[in-house]
Image (cartoon, rainbow, N blue to C red):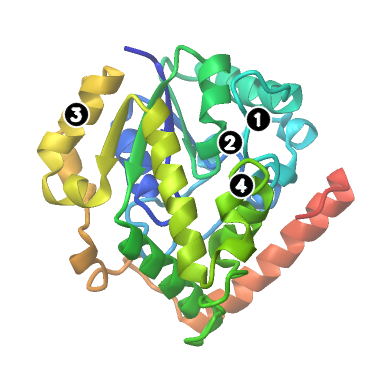
Amino acid sequence: MSNLVFISADFCSGSTLMFTLFRKTGQYYCLYEPLHPRLLEYLYYPLRAYEHHFFVDSYFTEYRGFKKIPVLFDPDWGVRRLFLPADANADDLYRYLSYLVGTAFGRSEKVLLKFNRATFRLGWLRAKFPQAKIVHIYRNREEQWNSVVRRGQRYLGREDIGQNDVMFQGFDIAAWCEDLQATFPELDARNSKTGYERFSKLWQLSLAENQRYADVSVDYKDLTHDFGTNCGKIWEAVGCDAEIEPLEKYVVPQEKQRAMPIFENNWNKRIVGVIDRAGRKYAKVRVRLNYGKTV
């Protein structure tokens, strides 16, 4: 049993659902994506809920009052130094995460950090935070790839987003491979012929690394289609005593997601887009002027 939990997962694999379940228990102080390169921006202008992220409301509310984040945070953590062995020297990252964990424990007896950028740092995290329980959620390789591509297509408004190229940058796939190839030579672009082939190698390495360190590893489809059993496995692994049945309403299987609106009152998309672009621009300027950092 531990009062500190780390969620680790790939992009588009169900980690936000896992975050939401812990958050909805009311027992954990939950911090979303502490290594997100745009975290400082989102503290000024919040990230809007994605189409498939149900019941989130706000991703970064819990960061309010964490005044030292701008001083300690480095946006490069999102795409660089992705591999950290247990004995790696990363004092800057340790100071930052220790600050988050310590401040959160000042507000709650239980704390959770949700990561999509910790996979190849789990050995280091395990060494630095040995009391933490690590929860891993993963998704079928083809389904995860399709989700990555679909989200890029919706965002850019076209079918061809470069997904067939080995340098495909959806969810920073190519950037991750470039950073990690010194440790995992199979990720070198010269060793793949398509974007999917390169992604597949990264997916396999990620699965192995997560399952090497996780206290519990759950398939996204199993969680959404047999919720009680799989949530029970997670609760047992971390020592959570929250009731499971009331949480099932927050689980929306993939086949039902398109029929459900994210918000009860959906504004005109064009108006939302204008506001969102203005908000993003404002946040970038504030971060650059106040902290001299760009993302």
- Which residue is denoted by mark 3 in the rendering? 233
Q: Identify the image quadrant of residue 149.
A: bottom left
Foreground mark, 3 or 2, reads 3
- Which residue is denoted by mark 1 in the rendering? 66
- The residue lying toward the viewer, choosing from 103 and 239, is 239
Q: Amino acid at mark 2?
A: Tyr
Could you tell which of marks 4 and 1 lies nearer the N-terminus?
4
Q: Secondary structure at mark 2?
A: helix
Answer whether residue 295 is visible to the viewer in this image: yes
**In this view, 206 is above or below 105:** below
Residue sitting at x 42%, y 14%:
109
Quarter of the image with the N terminus in it:
top left
Residues at marks 3 and 2 touching, judged by CB atoms closer than 8 Å: no
Q: Amino acid at mark 4?
A: His
Quarter of the image with the C terminus in it:
bottom right
Q: Secondary structure at mark 4?
A: loop
| 277 relative position to 61: left or right | right
Residues at marks 2 and 1 touching, judged by CB atoms closer than 8 Å: yes
Q: Amino acid at mark 3?
A: Lys
Query: Whole-percent x and y of residue 230?
Result: 17, 36
**Residue 129, which numbered label?**
none
Give the crowd class for mark 4: few <14, some 14-19, many >=20 residues within 10 Å: many
Gap in angstroms between the C-alphas marked 3 and 2: 29 Å
**Residue 63, which numbered label?**
2
Residues at marks 4 and 3 touching, judged by CB atoms closer than 8 Å: no
- Which residue is denoted by mark 4 in the rendering? 36
Could you tell which of marks 3 and 2 lies nearer the N-terminus?
2
Q: Amino acid at mark 1?
A: Phe
